Image (spheres, helix red, strand yellow):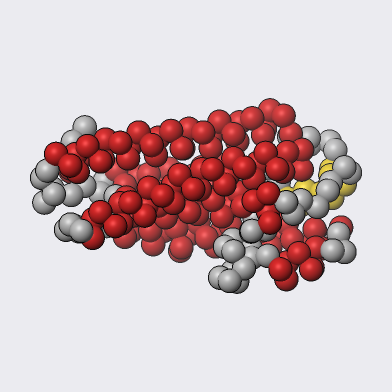
């Protein structure tokens, strides 16, 4: 595969090597997140242990559907922007950083959440309010980290259409799902309102989303 097909004007060995490394790193990060999701289903999916449950159309299946749409936009190169150096360096580096950061936060959040994880909007009988680890910085690090990864990959491949789809489609999906969960959490935990006040939903609190 010719990685310079994304930036045909950057016909140098430097960018060919970067894209080779970037593709490997992104593939590893995506594989780690997918594996973590499979582990969550295998270890923590407890359909008969719920105290409260609300079905949501935003769940693992629809998130994967968005992923395939997003990947299709990258494959067909729709919305590609031809940056020249040094702008290409900045966007590629920032994008790769977001992908790696998102992967680490996603895995960290899952390790902190453990048995409180659920595919649907659920309150378990054993449910605990999780506010440590990645949850100290954002209330929904699993959703936030996926947003960061999608944004990062769009920057690496300089694809404005893919980036636009994140904010037009995926972010609203995550906000909708997060608000569904928070409604049940507020009913279950009196201290959740204070946690909401101190902690941002998808970004650290100074962004206030």
Indicate the position of residue 121 as horizontal and vertical percent values.
73, 50
Please identify the quadrant where the C terminus is shown.
bottom right
Name the quadrant containing residue 13: top left
Indicate the position of residue 36 as horizontal and vertical percent values.
59, 34
In the picture provided, is 6 more to the left or to the right than 101?
left
Return the residue nearer the eye: 23 or 162: 23
Any part of residue 68 in sight? yes
In the picture provided, is 136 more to the left or to the right than 124?
left
Return the residue nearer the eye: 42 or 197: 197
Residue ID at (37%, 47%): 96
Residue ID at (64%, 59%): 138
Indicate the position of residue 183 as horizontal and vertical percent values.
77, 62
| Residue 41 higher or lower than 65, as above or below | above
In the picture provided, is 77 more to the left or to the right than 171?
left
Please identify the quadrant where the N terminus is shown.
top left
Residue ID at (41%, 49%): 97
| Residue 28 higher or lower than 134, as above or below | above
Indicate the position of residue 114 as horizontal and vertical percent values.
73, 38
Residue ID at (43%, 43%): 68
Any part of residue 117 in sight? no
| Residue 154 higher or lower than 115, as above or below | below
Name the quadrant containing residue 85: bottom left
Q: Could you tell me how many numbered marks the image carries? A: 0
């Amino acid at each position: 595969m010719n990685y310079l097909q994304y930036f045909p004007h950057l016909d140098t060995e430097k960018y060919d090597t970067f894209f080779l490394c970037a593709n490997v790193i992104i593939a590893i990060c995506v594989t780690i997140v997918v594996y973590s999701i499979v582990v969550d289903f295998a270890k923590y999916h407890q359909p008969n242990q719920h105290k409260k449950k609300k079905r949501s159309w935003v769940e693992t299946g629809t998130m994967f559907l968005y992923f395939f749409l997003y990947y299709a936009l990258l494959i067909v190169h729709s919305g590609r922007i031809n940056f020249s150096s040094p702008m290409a360096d900045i966007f590629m580096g920032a994008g790769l950083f977001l992908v790696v950061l998102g992967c680490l936060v996603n895995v960290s959040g899952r390790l902190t959440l453990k048995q409180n994880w659920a595919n649907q909007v659920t309150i378990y009988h054993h449910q605990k309010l999780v506010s440590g680890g990645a949850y100290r910085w954002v209330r929904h690090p699993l959703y936030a980290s996926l947003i960061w990864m999608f944004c990062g990959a769009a920057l690496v491949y300089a694809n404005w259409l893919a980036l636009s789809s994140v904010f037009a489609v995926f972010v609203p999906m995550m906000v909708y799902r997060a608000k569904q969960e928070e409604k049940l959490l507020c009913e279950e935990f009196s201290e959740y309102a204070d946690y909401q006040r101190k902690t941002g939903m998808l970004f650290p609190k100074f962004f206030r989303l």
